Amino acid sequence: MDGTLALIWLLTSVADMTANDCPNEGCLIKEPAQARLSYQFADVQFNDESIAEEFYMGYDSHRRKGPFQPTYGLSLTTDGSAWFGVGWKWTSQNVFDSPLFIETSMMPGLYAPREGIDLGGTLQFRSAFGIGYEFDNGSTITVAYDHRSNADTHARNPGLETLSIRYAVEWENGPQITSRF
């Protein structure tokens, strides 16, 4: 999968910014966003084989800059590996005037394999593509596919993929994490 999902994140977010943010108040203007806490279960795959199950917990920030919403994630797998990352998420407006949406993300992070696959280094980039549904109460359910690798920052660069289902809830009184981004 190499950098394909990262390229999709870049194209979707920059195209949205160019069409919707730049002509209005500015390309990277700070705006409020819906903060969400998410729980995700995934099948971890290596070389097209299922090798572990993953539990992922994420937080999407209460602010965004243009189309870029800061997002934070932590995952633990049944083979003992762990990953923590901070990055950006892009979410479409409702597709076809329905509760369906598309989201992409890019998150650099730190990976500890323990009994899991050696991915060639601690720094691992995780990029994802998902299709979701937003319920009337603001919660969402998303099916996502992601790829994790070190983006050739090390000589050895195998990758992991996950196929997941994520449930997210609005978090009105959650942490107000503010970044300089």
Image: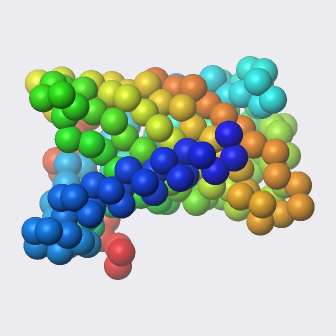
Say left or right for 124 vs 165. right
Q: Residue at x 43, y 33 (%)?
A: 130
Q: Residue at x 31, y 65 (%)?
A: 177
Quadrant where the N terminus is found in the figure: top right
Measured along the vertical axis of the image, is residue 43 above or below residue 62? above
Q: Quadrant of residue 153?
A: bottom right
Measured along the vertical axis of the image, is residue 181 above or below residue 86? below
Say left or right for 35 vs 152. left
Residue furthest right as drawn: 155
User: Looking at the picture, how far across and down is residue 150, in whole percent?
Assistant: 73, 57
User: Looking at the picture, how far across and down is residue 126, in whole percent?
Assistant: 59, 49
Say left or right for 168 vs 56. left
Q: Residue at x 43, y 54 (%)?
A: 11
Say left or right for 20 vs 114. left
User: Looking at the picture, how far across and down is residue 32, in whole percent?
Assistant: 15, 60
User: Looking at the picture, how far across and down is residue 179, in whole percent?
Assistant: 35, 73
| Along the viewing direction, whichever of 177 and 159 lies nearer the viewer | 159
Q: Is residue 8 visible?
A: yes
Q: Quadrant of residue 161?
A: top right
